[in-house]
Image (cartoon, rainbow, N blue to C red):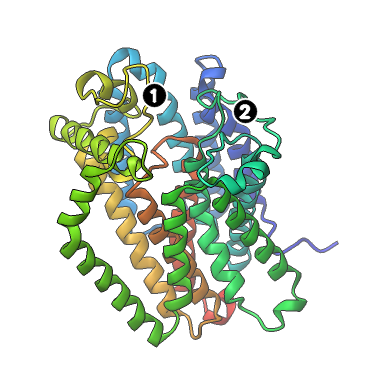
Amino acid sequence: MRRPSWFDTTLFGEILVLVATAPVFFFSTWFPIWAVPTAIVLIALSWFWRRRRLGYWLARTPADLALLIFFALLVMAVAVAPAPLRQQYAWPRAAIMLWCGALFVVVATHSARQPALLKFWMAAFLGVGLAIALVAPLGIEWVYKLPVLGSLLDAIPSVLRGVFTGAENGFSPNQVAGALLYVWPVAAAFAVYWPSGHRLRDVRWWLVSIATLVMLVVLALTQSRAGLLGAATGAVLIVLLPWRWGRWLLAFLVVSVAVGLFIGRDQLMAQLADVSPTDGLHTLISRTAIWDAALRGVYDFPLTGMGLGTFRAIMSVLYPLDNYTVAYDLAHAHNFFLQTALDMGLPGLIALLAIYLLAGVQTIALWRRGTGVHSGCRICGLGFAAALVAQTVYSQLDAVALGSKPGFLLWFLFGLIFGAANLAFRTPVQDVT
C-alpha cells in the first residue's frame, strides 16, 4: 500500500513527543516535580532525532534572533516573580511557553520541507480551531448581553465546567473568541478563495467552509465585543485586500476611522465620563482604569516586568482600583501588549513586536509570491495577514496572555507563517499551490 505524501516518519516521531508531553507542560501542577524536567529531556531528544534524520537542527527564519531573545527573557520573567507567586503563576506559564516554543520549531521546520507537509499542518491548524469551536461551548461561562440568545445558550450542556483549574466557573467567552481569531481568518480566506476550480465538487472545500461557519457561529455566541470587532476587521481585509479597488477602499476606511477618532476624541471621552456603571459602555470605562494601572506597572518595572502571570495578584496590592476588591481575580490587563510588558518587561515586548512585524513581512512576501487571487501562496498570505490583524485589533481590548492555555495557537500561527514563506521561496509556485 502506498504511503500518503503527507506521512513522514521524522515529523510524526516529533508529533508523538509533543502530544505525549503536552499534558505535563499544560497541567504541570498535576504532576510530580520531576515530570517537567523529564518532558524537557524528551523534547531535547526529539531535536536530536530531527538532527539525525534531516541533517540539521531546525529551519532558519528571519525571526531567529528575536525568538532567541524572547525565550531567553522568559528565564528572567520567572526569576523576578515574587517567591510565593513564582510557583503559583510564573512556573506553570513558563512550562506552557516552553512547549509553545517546541511547537513553533516543529511546525516551522517541517512545513518548510515540502508542500504536502505544509498542507498537513494547515489542516491540523484548522482542525484545532474547529475542535475548540465544538468543545469550548460545553464549558463556557456564558454572558447574556443579547437576551434573544438566552434560551439557546441555556440549552447548551455545560459538562466541562469545573474540569480545569482556573476555570472552575467555566471558560471565559472572551478567551474562546480570542483563540478562534487565530484560526478563523485563515479558514475564511481559503473558504472564499479556494485554490482550485470546481470547489463544489471538492470535499476539502466543504470541510473548510463548514469549519469556518462553525467557528463564526461560536464567535458570535461568545458576544465578545473585542472578538467580534477583530473578526469583522479580518473579514474586511479578506474581502477587500485582493482587489485594487478594495485596497483603495480599505485605505479610505482606515484614514476615515483614524481622522474620526482624532477629531472626536474629546467628545468621546466626555461621553464616557458621563456613563454610569449600569450603562452599556461600562466595560470600556473599567478597562481604561485597568490600562492606567497597567501603565503604572510598566513604568515601575520597565526592564524586568512583574513576573510572568503575576499581574493578577500584584495589581490589587500595588495599584488597587475602586471598582475591584482585593478578592477579585483580574487575570490580565485586557491588552495583550500591555500584559506582555507587565510579564516580561519592555525588552520582552520589543522582542515580541519584532516577531509580529517579521511575520507580517512574511505574509506580504507570500502574497507577492502568488500569481493570482486563487493561488495557494496568496491565500496563505491573505489568511495569515487577516489573522494577525484580527488578533491585533482584539488584543487592544483583551488578551490571550502569554502562557495561557489557548496561547499555543499564536505560536502555531507563527510557525505556519515562517514555514510557508521558507517553502514558497525555494519551491516553484505551482508546487506550493
| Residue at (50% x, 85% y) in the render | 372
Q: Position of residue 194 (x, y in %)?
A: 61, 76
* Corner quadrant of residue 86: top left
Q: Residue at x 58, y 70 (%)?
A: 190
What residue is shown at x 54% (from left), y 14% (from top)? 32
Spot occupied by residue 108 in the image (x, y as percentages of width and height): 48, 55
Mark 1: which amino acid? Asp
Question: Which residue is nearer to you in this view: 75 or 313?
Answer: 313
Q: Is residue 25 visible?
A: yes
Q: Spatial distance from mark 2 to mark 1, Cα to Cα?
A: 18 Å
Secondary structure, mark 2, is loop
State the residue position of label 2: 161
300 lies left or right of 413: left
Residue 178 percent across, percent down from the top left: 47, 47
Q: Secondary structure at mark 1?
A: loop
Foreground pick, 135 / 91: 135
Q: Is residue 10 left or right of residue 339?
A: right
Which numbered marker is on residue 189?
none
Give the side of residue 101 with respect to residue 14, left or right: left
Image quarter where the C terminus lies is: bottom right
Q: Nearer the viewer, residue 263 or 219?
A: 263
Q: In the image, what residue type sits under mark 2?
A: Arg
Q: Residue 16: name its quadrant.
A: top right
Most extreme residue toward the right is: 1
Give the quadrant of the N terminus.
bottom right
Residue depicted at 34% across the width and 47% down the height: 397
Measured as percent of width and height from the top left, residue 84 is found at 33, 12
Q: Which residue is labeled 1 in the image?
A: 329
Name the residue nearer the viewer: 22 or 2. 22
In the image, residue 286 above or below residue 221? above
